[in-house]
Image (tube, helix red, strand yellow):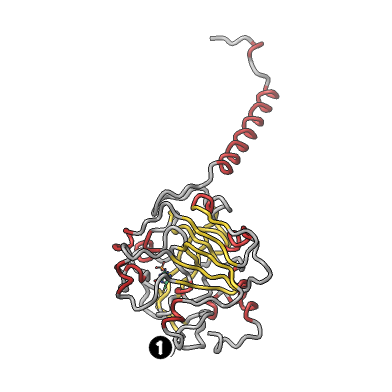
């Protein structure tokens, strides 16, 4: 069929129309990203709109099955394979985290509110356990400072304390663990505000599996893994240094700071080397787990043997 010339859109107008359509679609996509924030509906659910952060090490990533199958989560048992099975009992919804203490505006946020605070980033961090093994994980989340800034800390706030969820009925491993619960941790305020300290909601493109601390945990990559507290329900700004689980349990073995430091041995073993899970030969452990360029200045003038 012949189309009359009068009905043919001139190329100039057609280009203008396409340009407008393109702008409209881009705006709609951007608006969609803004008005439809990520909702967390369970563990192991694909997370959309995650941006790759420049905080990423080049080391080979540890396979998903290892990251999610070899865990420390003493509430669900002390052997590495127990959390993957027993943490399925962890109730992650509904979930709230309260932020309180030395703050102007204490708040309790549910998970959806947390997820709306900032775009989700994928950060590939080294993770060094005090026991001598290490992994490399593509975590998902955003800087812990983002949530801390929500409540306006007062000038008295010098430390931040964190508390994990604790439910005696489902966390049956806790009775044999030999440590006190709820699990508690702490950071000095400047450590907590450091951009590398991550409020983590996922790994490998998905929301956190329960055994990795669903739905919300810390990842503090320059410190031994036990500082990276799982399944956080309470954040408290404090004037005094807060108690921490492993320091309470064995003060001669675990200090408050617990920065990865190959020069300071654990009283019962050396920290000079580590075994990257999946590798045969041990590799040297890096001071501050290799993040010294970013964090060493936090400890200027401190004796890291004393403040271990
Ligand atoms: N958080 C809680 N609540 N309970 C724990 O037992 N273990 C810590 C830390 N956070 C622990 C915790 C230790 S010792 C390590 S090494 C890391 O979690 C392990 O994290 P991953 O299982 O995701 O590798």
Res 28 → quadrant: top right
Q: Nearer the viewer, residue 27 or 97?
A: 97
Specify few, some or many for label 1: CA neighbours under 10 Å numbering under 14, 14-19, or 20 or more: few
Res 84 → quadrant: bottom left
Question: Residue 187 in the image: x percent, y percent?
Answer: 56, 73
Residue 19 in sight from this viewpoint: yes
Name the residue at the right extreme: 12
The answer to whether the residue bearing label 1 lies less than 8 angstroms from the nearest atom of ligand 1 is no
Question: Residue 275 in the image: x percent, y percent?
Answer: 40, 78
**Which image quarter has ligand 1?**
bottom left
Q: Does 203 appear above or below 255?
A: above
Question: Residue 177 in the image: x percent, y percent?
Answer: 33, 75
Q: Nearer the viewer, residue 164 or 126?
A: 164
Q: Does 269 appear above or below 197?
A: below
Question: Residue 72 in the image: x percent, y percent?
Answer: 37, 71
Q: Nearer the viewer, residue 262 or 34?
A: 34
User: Left or right of 21: which side holds 81?
Assistant: left
User: Left or right of 269: which side holds 30?
Assistant: right
> Residue at left 53%, top 45%?
37
Q: Nearer the viewer, residue 161 or 118?
A: 161
> Residue at left 65%, top 18%?
9
User: Disc count in the image?
Assistant: 1
Residue 84 in sight from this viewpoint: no
The residue identified by callout 1 is 269
SS category of the residue bearing label 1: loop
């Amino acid at each position: 069929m012949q189309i009359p010339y009068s009905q043919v859109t001139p190329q100039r107008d057609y280009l203008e129309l396409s340009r407008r359509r393109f702008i409209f679609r881009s705006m709609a996509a951007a608006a969609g990203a803004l008005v439809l924030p990520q909702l967390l509906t369970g563990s192991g659910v694909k997370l959309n709109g995650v941006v790759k952060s420049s905080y990423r090490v080049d080391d080979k990533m540890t396979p998903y099955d290892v990251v999610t199958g070899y865990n420390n989560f003493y509430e669900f048992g002390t052997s590495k394979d127990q959390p993957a099975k027993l943490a399925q009992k962890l109730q992650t919804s509904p979930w709230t985290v309260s932020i309180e203490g030395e703050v102007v505006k204490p708040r309790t946020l549910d998970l959806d509110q947390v997820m709306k605070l900032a775009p989700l980033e994928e950060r590939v961090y080294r993770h060094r356990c005090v026991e001598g093994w290490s992994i490399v994980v593509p975590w998902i989340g955003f800087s812990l400072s983002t949530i801390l800034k929500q409540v306006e800390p007062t000038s008295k706030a010098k430390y931040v304390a964190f508390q994990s969820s604790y439910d005696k009925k489902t966390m049956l491993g806790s009775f044999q663990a030999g440590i006190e619960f709820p699990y508690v941790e702490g950071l000095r305020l400047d450590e907590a505000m450091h951009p590398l300290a991550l409020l983590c909601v996922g790994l490998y493109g998905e929301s956190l599996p329960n055994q990795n601390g669903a739905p919300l945990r810390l990842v503090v990559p320059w410190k031994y893994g036990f500082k990276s507290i799982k399944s956080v329900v309470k954040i408290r700004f404090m004037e005094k240094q807060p108690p921490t689980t492993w320091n309470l349990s064995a003060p001669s073995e675990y200090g408050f700071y617990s920065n990865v430091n190959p020069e300071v041995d654990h009283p019962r073993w050396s920290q000079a080397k580590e075994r990257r899970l999946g590798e045969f030969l041990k590799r040297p452990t890096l001071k501050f787990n290799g993040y010294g360029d970013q964090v060493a200045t936090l400890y200027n003038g401190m004796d890291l043997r004393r403040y271990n």
